[in-house]
Amino acid sequence: MIFSLVKRNVLLYFRDKISVFFSMLSVMIIIGLYVLFLGRMVESSGEVAGENARFLTDSWIMAGVIATATITTTLGGLGQMVDDLSRKINRDFETAPIERWKIVISYAISSVVIGVIMSIFTFILAEVYIIAYGGEFVGFGALLRVLGVVILSTVASSSFLFFFVSMIKTMNAYSTISTIVGTLIGFLMGIYVPVGALPNAIQSFIKVFPFSHSASLIRQIMINEVIDLEYLPREVSETLGIQFYFNDVVVSQLTSIMFLVGTALIFFGLSVIITTKRKREV
Amino acid sequence: MDKIIDVLNLHKSYGEVHAVKGIDFYVEKGKLFAFLGPNGAGKSTTINVICTLLSYSEGEVIVDGLKLGIDDALIRQRIGIVFQDSVLDNLLTIEENLRIRGSFYGLSPNELDTAIENALIVTDIKEIKNRRYGQLSGGQRRRVDIARALLHNPKILFLDEPTTGLDPQTRKSVWRMIENLYINHGVTVFLTTHYMEEAAKADYVVVIDNGEIVAKGTPIELKEKYSTDSLQIKPIDKKKVTQLLIDNKVAFTEISDLMIIPIDSTMDSIPLLKLLDQQISAFQVLNGTMDDAFIGITGKEMRE
């Protein structure tokens, strides 16, 4: 039952070309902006990476793009839940001998499946871009680690977003949320403006925002392929949001991972509470 | 007599609103049951309660020997519902839709294949099974909706206005399919409709208004009780005929240049025609219809 519901939701997402396009829109905008402002960024990283300046900047921006995809495409995948509710398709599920929790969990699982597929697709595009401009393909170990972070980040964002989306009843409200997320995400991930260039209050907020840790982890893995992280000056690392520091103590990869795991668990719990308490409506 | 649905003193309130105010009725097994009522009468609420979608405030409902509210999972296994608005996915093909929805009923892969095959044949949509639901015509969609509801061989099929919005020809062919279901396949059909000619074919009719049952019986009983036959005449000289009718204490109403005289039975028209001989240019004797009966019961037109 869960399997066929997940299959349904995933099929419906990929057959609706417009929803696929819109869930990738933020990613495309970021890449577009990057291409436009490329020259200046490469220049400024030249002093750190030397001849690898281009490879470094490309890896940095693409790491942010992949982290963004784990959120926006997962949100796109959750749209089916709102669509079913607003078109009252859920009545067909609720009058069948299938437990309610199975229906609900299948939306969450399908958003993870969609998010992972689309993020991997983004990762492939990113690598193609990096190689096309003289960079190198990530090593096998780094590839697996990126995939691991992508999956973790997608699960956490599915859990986090599910909590908010499950309170929505109309497609209008859902579109509004998608627009807000799509607009803010580039800033929260420290892509449009590097974290170090933002005011302190916002920097602190970004540091406790779970998904900027996805970006940070993917940056660490991908940039390590260009230049050994140990040789990266702290100032550069901190400014570009590659590593976060709390009172001069660097946030370890394990801490970032645990932070994402914690987010996934807490919001999963909250989502369970909210969906079981919601009254049945027709 | 075998009751497949038995509703006893059913109440349903939404906060302050008392939508269903203690109704009693039953549905006989293998019959075509019509549930009628104007919009907002409590019709949908009642169906949603029986279909396990809504909880109820008071009373008891037994569906195929199972108590509603306790054995809901088992009841769901035995009912099929065709909702008024479509609940299938536009972007999936007919077969994909049926396979996904069919997976809810715990059938083995082989059983599911057979179930899909049978449903496609009964509803006559096998040739188009690979087309996307969203690309189908209204009549074809209805057939798919019905196929979906039949997948698990339900004992009771709920049809909520199955022919609304279809053109007359499609409506007839969908209706023939529904008739085939309860005549040849022994499915009990619980129907709501806006078309009185469909209700007239039911074995039993219940009319609900303002949350209460206002009439029940076979279509013939309802017609006899709530509608009258009438004699329609076209007078040559309206004033003269009017006077003649008043003198003979015959009640009548006028509609443009026609005059309508209610009569108890069609035979009663003979003495009236004798009386009006030479005074009229045309006449017609009309039997009461379900439409008349419905208006007689609720004081409202069905189609708004």
Image: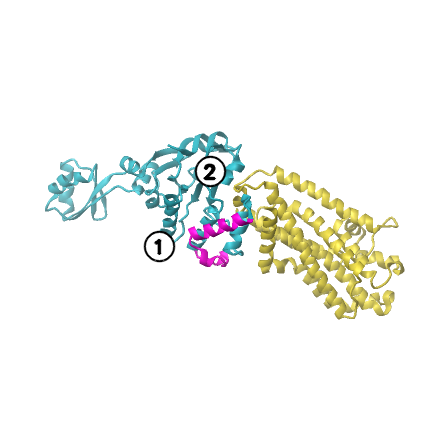
Chain colours: A yellow, B cyan
* Left or right: A56 in relation to B161: right
Residue A197, percent across and down? Answer: 80, 57
The residue shown at (67%, 51%) is: A112
Give residue B127's quadrant in the image: bottom left
Q: Nearer the viewer, residue B152 or A80?
A: B152
Residue B66, magenta (yes or no)? no
Q: CA distance from mark 2 to mark 1?
A: 30 Å
Q: Nearer the viewer, residue A58 or B26?
A: B26
The residue shown at (84%, 56%) is: A238
Residue B130, magenta (yes or no)? yes
Residue B171, percent across and down? Answer: 37, 51
The residue shown at (36%, 33%) is: B214
How many residues crowd mark 2 within 10 Å: few (<14), some (14–19), many (20+)?
Answer: many
**Label 1 is found on which chain of the structure?**
B
| Numbered mark located on residue A60 in the image | none
Q: Earlier in the sequence, mark 2 or mark 1?
A: 2
- Which quarter of the rendered picture does the N terminus of chain B lie within? top left
Judge if badges 2 and 1 mark residues of a common chain. yes
Q: Amino acid at mark 1?
A: Gln
Write down the residue under mark 1.
Answer: B169
How many residues crowd mark 1 within 10 Å: few (<14), some (14–19), many (20+)?
Answer: few
**Label 2 is found on which chain of the structure?**
B
Answer whether residue B258 is visible to the viewer in this image: yes
Q: Which residues are magenta?
A: B109-137
Write down the residue under mark 2.
Answer: B45
Q: Amino acid at mark 2?
A: Thr
Q: Nearer the viewer, mark 2 or mark 1?
A: 1
* Left or right: B103 in relation to A124: left
For the stretch drawn in magenta, what is the main secondary structure?
Answer: helix
* Left or right: B142 in relation to A98: left
